[in-house]
Image: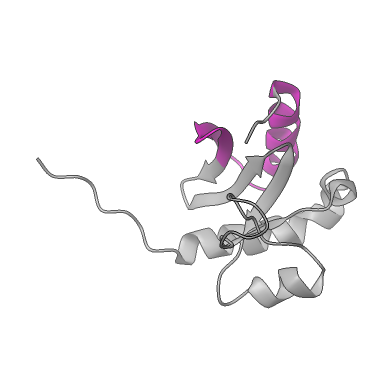
Amino acid sequence: MAVTAGFREYALEQLGRHAPGAKARAMFGGVSISTNEGTFALIDEDVVYLKGDARNRDEYLAAGWPPFRPFGSEGSAMGYYAVPGELLEDAESLAPWVLLAREAAQRAPKKKPRTS
């Protein structure tokens, strides 16, 4: 689970075009991308994954986007789907997919603050 610095900046720039205020944060060797709405993307091994949920997962699967499997092909899948590299380069075509991911982030349960 590694992300090169150059790819991290490139992905944040591309996603940020459609998610103002997007921020990257290191997470378990990868990177999470979030806005005030929540985490809508992950980066692992220089691949961007967008957030899916019960309402939009079929759109990602129909497009042929594989799910993120942090523990290899035999491990369980997470609710994030791999963005094809050529789509990441096409800001206009990327826009509706980022919107789907941001909407999924908004619907996700929010973590409760820790109490002492």
Picture quarter containing residue 17? top right
- The colour scheme used here is one colour
Picture quarter containing residue 68? bottom right
x, y (%) of residue 35? Answer: 52, 44
Q: Is residue 60 visible?
A: yes
Q: Is residue 56 above or below residue 32?
A: below
Residue shown at 44%/63% (left/top)? 108
Horizontal relation, residue 1 to residue 47: left or right: left
x, y (%) of residue 36? Answer: 46, 46
x, y (%) of residue 39? Answer: 51, 49
In the rendered image, the residue lying farthest to the top is 5
Residue shown at 83%/47% (left/top)? 91
Q: Is residue 63 above or below residue 7?
A: below
Q: Is residue 22 visible?
A: no
Instruction: Name the one closer to the observer, 59 or 96.
Output: 59
Tell me the magenta residue range. 5-32
Picture quarter containing residue 9? top right
Horizontal relation, residue 78 to residue 59: left or right: left
Residue 7 in the magenta stretch? The answer is: yes
